[in-house]
Image (cartoon, rainbow, N blue to C red):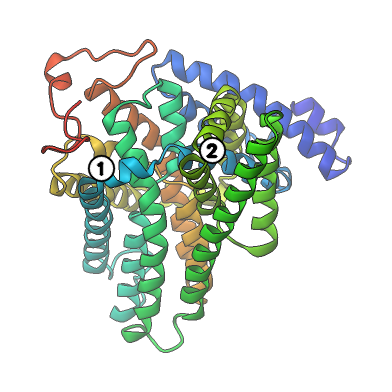
Amino acid sequence: MALFQQLTRAGPLEARATLALGFLLLAAHLGGELAKRFRLPRVTGYLVTGFVVGPAWLGLVRGDEVVALGFISDAAMALIAFAAGSQLKLEMLRRDAVPLARLSVGTMLFPLGLVAAVILSVSPWFPLTVHQPLGDALAVALVLGTIAAASSPSLTVALIDELDAGNGPVARAVLGVSIVKDVLVVGLFALVLGNVPLFASPGAVDVTVAWTTLLRGAGSISAGAALGYVASRYARIVDRDTLLLLVAVAFLTAVAVRFSGIETMLMALTTGFYVANFAPVEGERLRGELKRSAVPVYIVFFALAGAALQAEAVQLLMENWTWVVLLVALRALGLRLGTRFAGGEHAWLGLVSQGGLALALGAAARRAFPEWGVSLQAWTVVIVGVHEIIGPICFRRALRLTGEVTGGEHVTEKRDADQPALISGGSGLSQR
């Protein structure tokens, strides 16, 4: 690949990006297999491989090539989010509404409160707030706390498929909670930004970003429902070319995102949810076809996600690793306390992952705070990158502890397998 890179240096960007995509498919597939040899999730191997060969390290894939492949990445994300949304059923939401609500609220508010409180208390030394007045420091703390409340349905559904754990109560609950949190965190972020002017310095925040974020979230859900209606009607009338329909859904989502600025994850989640619940026969057919072709989709998306990590983010991590460890630990503690609040035990490990929504909130924070938003977004990228790597490992650990891993994975300690899976009580989530 290094030789090809030298030979094609003067070539058109589109041609170089196509070559880079083929290389990423091969290299990340190998990286996933090597990760499996070391008893790590394949997803982790895809991410690490993308980072290693990307512009931040070896540079076998250039930065402009990663940008050019952004449309492919959006389409792959749409397919993954569609698969996640299609596994969230209204029957499950009605049956387990109370435990899911408690777990969602607990794993949002505890990380938010803990991260915000500690960052505010150390604001005279924290790099983002060291020279800021108390009101602006509080704004930074609240924004970081809100971003800490987000999780990643894409990483969750990828690991569930890899380990064939879709029928377990913890796997279903974690996926459902991560989807619900994706919707709620957008509103929470807008609420925080809307109230920042009450205590921040004059002109420190652009309040219009709060309303823009809220409108984009609502627009993403509406567009996803409309696309779900069209896709389900087409699938009902034309009982063939299912794979072609999935590709069309992916690229229509990517096009809508590019031209309207709506959120890919929310739109595709809504599309999958609509098809699964309002056209269940067609939804099952689409989900089955997507599951059969999921591996290359996961490889493309997560390898590109790893390659998108820039050298500046790595440098920031190396220079401020103690602060990054503190933020990651605070978020993990908040997730665990929130799960305990809901009466659960191991589910917090499945909510460690972060992804596209957290990065989108970081980009919105950059626009909202003109003076120091760039630095805030850089910190968000670093923290999300760390959670992308450790999140699948933690979720795999949770599934092993609750005995939900199949396909060659087994629980080795009976005492772990005998523990309640998520919620103590009489709901469908209560026992393994």
Quadrant placement of the C terminus: top left
Give the amino acid at mark 1: Arg
Decide: is 432 above or below 110.
Answer: above
The one of 239 and 186 positioned closer to us in this rendering:
239
Q: Give the distance between the C-alpha atoms of the residues marked 2 and 1, in whole angstroms.
A: 25 Å
Mark number for residue 95?
1
Find numbered disc 1 in the image and state the secondary structure of the residue it sits on: helix
Quadrant placement of the N terminus: top right
- Residue at image location 37% in from the left, 48% down from the top: 321
**Seen in the image, is 335 located left or right of residue 69?**
left
Q: Residues within 10 Å of mark 1 (few under 14, many from 20)?
A: few
Can you give x and y, in whole percent of width and height, for residue 369 in the image? 48, 75
The one of 268 and 77 positioned closer to us in this rendering:
268
Numbered circles on residues, count: 2
Asked if one can make out residue 81 in the rendered structure from this viewpoint, the answer is yes
**In the rendered image, which residue does mark 2 sit on?**
80
In the picture, residue 39 is in which quadrant?
Answer: top left
Seen as rendered, the residue at the extreme front is 237
**Seen in the image, is 344 located left or right of residue 253?**
left
Give the amino acid at mark 2: Ile
In the picture, residue 285 is in which quadrant?
Answer: top right
